[in-house]
Each structure stands twice: as structure tokens, then as C-alpha cells.
Image: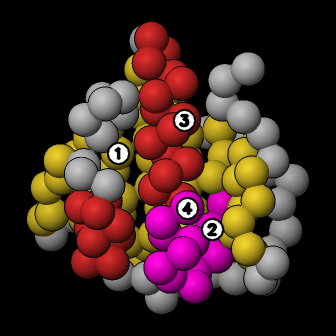
Amino acid sequence: MKITMSLEIESGISMSEISWVLSELGAELCVDSNGVSGNFNISNTYFVFRECDGFDEVVTEGVSVGWAVGVRGAFHCPVDSLAESSDDIKRFLSVLSEEKSCRFILSFQYESAYAIRDEGGLHFLKEMVS
């Protein structure tokens, strides 16, 4: 069984920039015309990133922002390694935040925000595991 964490990234970031961050973390990845996919070695979390066509709004419930989504991502986390998945995702978001100025929102299936990168920096709002 898996849970899915959704990531909405502000327009302006490229697939090559996302690939670079993932590579820095040692993730196995595949880059093709559809986007970037692969997995983190420790947690075996499978991820997929795709560019959005045109102007896409943030769809995470309860979040209102003034920027357009350029890339949507999903992390499919095995329940039996949820703590490791959480660590991998946090490391990815931290490096992305340090290296790029893009804003983003991590949510549980677009229902509840877990992390937000805004003008004030990266904020973790909830933990994936207790």
C-alpha cells in the first residue's frame, strides 16, 4: 500500500533543474519527453514530475496564492517506509528551496498542505509521520 504526496511548483522551473536536484540526492531517474520519473533508493518512493500546459492554478484545498503552477509532481510513498519517504521528500524540498527561488506547495493528495515555500522561505506545516 502507498500514499501519494502531491507537489505543485511555480511556473518558471525546468525539468532539467528538477532532475539536477534529484541527481544531487542520489535518486535514480529517467528523463524523457513526458517529464521526470524515478525513485529514491532508501525509501523506494516513486516520483513523477510533469510540466503543465498553459496557466494552471494551485488546486490544494484551503490554499490561496497568486502564482501559476508550472510543474506538478507526485511522490508515491510505501507505507512500510513512510519515515524514510518523509526524509527523502524533505531533503528534496530543502535542496530545491536552497538552490531555486520557485514557490511550491506539498500536500497530501491536494487535500491538506504539508509544506509551503513562499517569499518567507520553506515552512513545514505538518509531519507525514508522528
Mark positioned earlier in the residue sequence (4 or 1): 1
Structural distance between the alpha carbons of marks 4 and 2: 11 Å
Residue 63 image offset from top left, x and y in percent: 83, 60
Q: Can residue 110 be seen in this view?
A: no
Disc 4 vs disc 2: Cβ atoms closer than 8 Å?
A: no
Structural distance between the alpha carbons of marks 3 and 4: 12 Å
Disc 3 vs disc 2: Cβ atoms closer than 8 Å?
A: no
Residue 42 image offset from top left, x and y in percent: 31, 30
Q: Which residue is drawn at 85% across and 68% down?
A: 64
Residue 29 image offset from top left, x and y in percent: 18, 53
Name the amino acid, label 3.
Ser
Name the amino acid, label 4.
Ser
Structural distance between the alpha carbons of marks 1 and 3: 13 Å
**Which residue position is annotated with label 3?**
86
Mark positioned earlier in the residue sequence (3 or 2): 3
Work out whether 32 lies above or below 85.
below
Q: Which of marks 4 and 1 is in front?
A: 4
Mark positioned earlier in the residue sequence (1 or 2): 1
Disc 4 vs disc 1: Cβ atoms closer than 8 Å?
A: no
Specify whether residue 57 is painted magenta: no
Q: Which residue is drawn at 54% across and 59% down?
A: 93
Q: What stretch is highlighted in magenta?
A: 94-105
**Which residue position is annotated with label 4?**
94
Mark positioned earlier in the residue sequence (1 or 3): 1
**Which residue position is annotated with label 2?**
104
Secondary element type, mark 3 = helix
